[in-house]
Amino acid sequence: MHFSGIAMEMFLSGPPRRCCFLFAGPPFPLPPADTCLMNTRDVKKAWLEIWVLSWPLVLTMFLQFVVGLTDVYVAGLFRPEVQGAVGFGGQVLFFFSVFANALGVGIVAIIARSVGARDQGAMWHTARQGLLLAVLVTGPLSLLGIVLGSFDQLYWFLPEKVAAEGARLLPFYAAALLPQGVLTVVAAICRARGRMLVILLCYGLTALLNLAGDFLLPFGYWLFPGVGAKGIAMATMASSLFGALLALLVLVRQGMAVSDWRLDRQLAARLWKLGWPMGMLQLGWQFGSLALYAILGFLPAQAVAATAALTNGLRIEAILYLPAYALNMIAAVLVGQALGSRNRQRAAQLGWQVAAIAALVLSLLAVPVFIYSMELARAISPDPLVQQLTHLYLRFNMISQPFMAVGVCLGGALEGAGDTAGTMKVVLGALWVIRIPLAAVLALATRLGAVGVWGAMVVSMILQGIFMAIRFRRGRWQDIDFAGGPGKAQVNM
């Protein structure tokens, strides 16, 4: 990706010019009311505009996916314990990023309505408060990790060699937590405003810097002395700091004032009320994944092969999920903006349209994976038993892809409307009431083994999509109200 100096200057400039719409855009991302997406009745045009909004997010998430794989690959060039420590550090960073991600959901819901209502004052006030809260939440955690992360006694539960490597890497990952929290919040602000190319630029340059650092810092080249395995974590830290500073510069150049950073307790409470259910959802989902691994670990036979097959299947599915989760974010923005303009009917139409697009896209992607599931399994693992179980995992789970897409996108629509608690109830209910108990029964109380877990995953995902559609169809999310001026939003759930 290359941006000339002229393009960069146009991107950073505040007042928009006609030639730089893709980079800076108008004061608000919506075109005039008679042509904007929320008012158009042309289905083909609506689908095209949804695609225009979503492709930068798909590419952004793909770049993040590549960075994660590269980190693990470079770590593997050293020693197995380094690879384990890098994987553990990434999981720690992901765990604590839940706070910033949850905050971002609330920011999208409130700012999207401000955009729909054409209220710039409320929009920028919420943006500043979101950034302030990101620093207040992730800053102490980052500092604590920097100070304590080097004590390998904290990692007593890890193998000794992995713990020793982790103590060398964790302070750098901890230092990356604060800038990554800021970058997450800036991305939420930009999504709510429809500035998807801003997200792609910031995350894209961050990813490219991280990828370069993954090879330059550990091994050294020209002016860069090699620092060994810790260079992988240093690359994450340096690229995250660069991305956060670039993102903040963009917001300032696009009109965000750098004054008035006093904490608005009322708005902070609204953001908390919107965000905490999504934090619980992410934590619950992570523990649910661990529960599946635990169930497979209790199998009297094939336990190792089954856990390997689950890892392989999730890795392949992660690529398919990219467009679904990009459309999840788009649905949140479009529904929030439509409600902000007091167009409830259009908000519902947009939610169903995005869900339909996602179901179609995921169905098309699932067909070749279903057909060539054994070939994919053989490409990932040389073990025949792992291949067979991975093949069955893909065959089973490709059936549920359209339902997964509908559930994910309508969940995003509910988040954009402020019904984050409803999304949490549906997802965690399907996971902990249906998937985990059913997987335990089918895998351990019958002869199905790992196949029983695959079947439970399919059943729970289908029901999750159905339950999410029912909740969205009832329309109670349309009564969640954000009223008042800057810092005075009322959330009636």
Image (cartoon, rainbow, N blue to C red):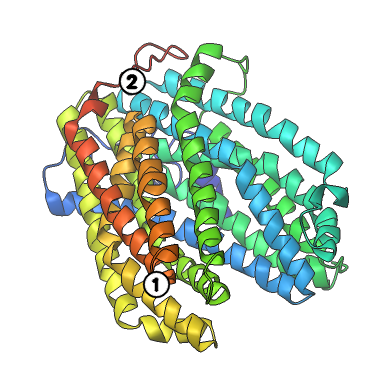
**Residue appearing at x 78%, y 67% in the figure:** 82
Point 57% across, 32% down: residue: 252
Q: Earlier in the sequence, mark 2 or mark 1?
A: 1
Where residue 412 sits, quadrant-wise, is top left
Residue 2 in sight: no
Q: Residues within 10 Å of mark 1 (few under 14, many from 20)?
A: few
| Residue 204 pos. (x, y %) | 55, 57
As drawn, 69 above or below 12: below
Q: Quadrant of the C terminus?
A: top left
Number of numbered tags placed on the structure image: 2
The answer to whether residue 87 is left or right of residue 51 is right
Q: Are marks 2 and 1 in contact (CB under 8 Å)?
A: no
Residue lying at 80% horizontally and 52% vertically, measured from the top left: 155
Horizontal side, residue 100 vs residue 333: left or right: right
Quadrant position of residue 119 = top left
Picture coordinates of residue 449, whole percent (x, y)? 43, 70
Question: Given the current orientation, which residue lies at the most extreme left position?
Answer: 41
Residue at x 22%, y 23% (from the top left corner): 342
Query: Could you say where residue 189 lies in the image, as x and y percent from the top left?
Result: 47, 35
Q: Nearer the viewer, residue 112 or 201?
A: 112
Residue at label 1?
Answer: 447
- The amino acid sitting under disc 1 is Arg
Q: Which x, y percent locates residue 168? A: 85, 56
- Cα separation between marks 2 and 1: 45 Å
Which residue was labeled with disc 2? 493
